[in-house]
Amino acid sequence: MKKMVGFGDYLLRLNPEGYLRFIQADHFQINYTGAEANVCVSLAMMGMDTEFVTRLPDNDIAACGVAELRKFNVGTSHIAYGGERMGVFYAEKGASQRPSKIVYDRKYTSIATCAYEDFDWEDIFAGATHFHMTGITPALSKTIPSVCIKACRKAKEMGLTVSCDLNYRKNLWTEAEANACMVQLMPYIDVLVANEEDAEKVLGIKARDTDVTQGKLNREGYIDVAEQICQTYGTKMVAVTLRRSISASDNEWSAMLYTNGKPYFSKQYMIHLVDRVGGGDSFTAGLLYGIMNDYGPQETIEYAAAASCLKQTIELDFNLSTADEVERLVGGDGSGRVQR
């Protein structure tokens, strides 16, 4: 069986119940999350073999988070321990015209202060076929980019397929810092996931005739962006999520996969959002599921878009949809009728 290794941050998510604002909350709900961890859990729910690699403090809070990963059959045997704290982010869920808000507390965490030597990469990648990380991980400190670059280089040396979600976070680093790091990573990346903002802010490649703030999408612009990325960096596949935000509660959702000089577009879904955090990670997991199971490009992008559609109807960050549930939606069963 093919195996995916994810490397990145693992942190606490704290949020008020329901749609309460921060100022209204007198307690917070606890959840464990992280972009790469979300991908691992999603793939494990679909029956794939996954291993999550990170660095955590050796304390009871981290142990609870690791137990959560094991609950979903994600491998945790290569987690390194050291440092003093896990990162935290606070999430306030938006509704209608009020947007969601995220507040980060992620400086000086165990993963941010890690070194390449904290991990036995030869052992970690033994038997693995795919390696995944995101642009969030190198944004966590000034020293971790070199860890990410060396890990990707080692993965390529050992024959793994490397995937990356650009995942630009303006609260973590500047566009210039993101560009300086990610252009060094790009030659090692086989499969790139990005939205229109990521491509522009991180790689300086803009989709023509597109304004996300006005909900304006142009397919030809995304094809042009993907083609430029493939030509510039030798990337084999570029996947772009196409979200038209009608409000914080309702989005139109579809996606494009560009490979071998040809674009493939998924069907479009109208989603009434329950929780959009982790939506991109579930898309990446669906994309990797299709690739790891040798699906064709059209089948792969349909599966990825459907998987992410389902995630955004599920509370918290993990996509707890099975492969059968995703395939049913791909097949047109999206009525939401009770399954008896």
Image (spheres, rainbow, N blue to C red):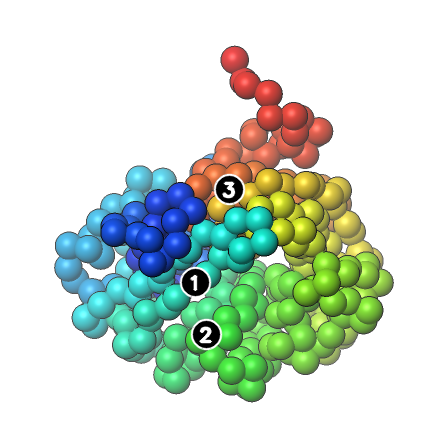
Tag 2: residue type? Asn
Q: Which is more N-terminal, label 3 or label 2? A: 2
- x, y (%) of residue 70? 30, 44
Tag 3: residue type? Val
Q: Estimate how packed mark 2 is, as few (under 14), some (14 to 19) or many (20 or more) residues with alpha carbons within 10 Å.
A: few
Task: Tell me the number on the disc at residue 102.
Answer: 1
Q: Estimate how packed mark 1 is, as few (under 14), some (14 to 19) or many (20 or more) residues with alpha carbons within 10 Å.
A: some
Helix, strand, or loop for circle 2?
A: loop
- x, y (%) of residue 53? 35, 60
Tag 1: residue type? Ile
- x, y (%) of residue 131? 49, 60
**Residue drawn at point x = 77 percent, y = 60 percent:** 217
Which residue bears the numbered disc 2? 171
53 and 264: which one is in front?
264
Helix, strand, or loop for circle 1?
A: strand
In the image, farthest residue toward the front: 24
Q: Does residue 76 sit above or below 232 in this rendering?
A: above
Which residue bears the numbered disc 3? 274
Question: In the displayed structure, does residue 5 sit left or right of residue 329?
Answer: left
**Residue drawn at point x = 51 percent, y = 42 percent:** 274
- x, y (%) of residue 83? 21, 72
Task: Give the Cα separation between the discs numbered 1 and 3.
Answer: 16 Å
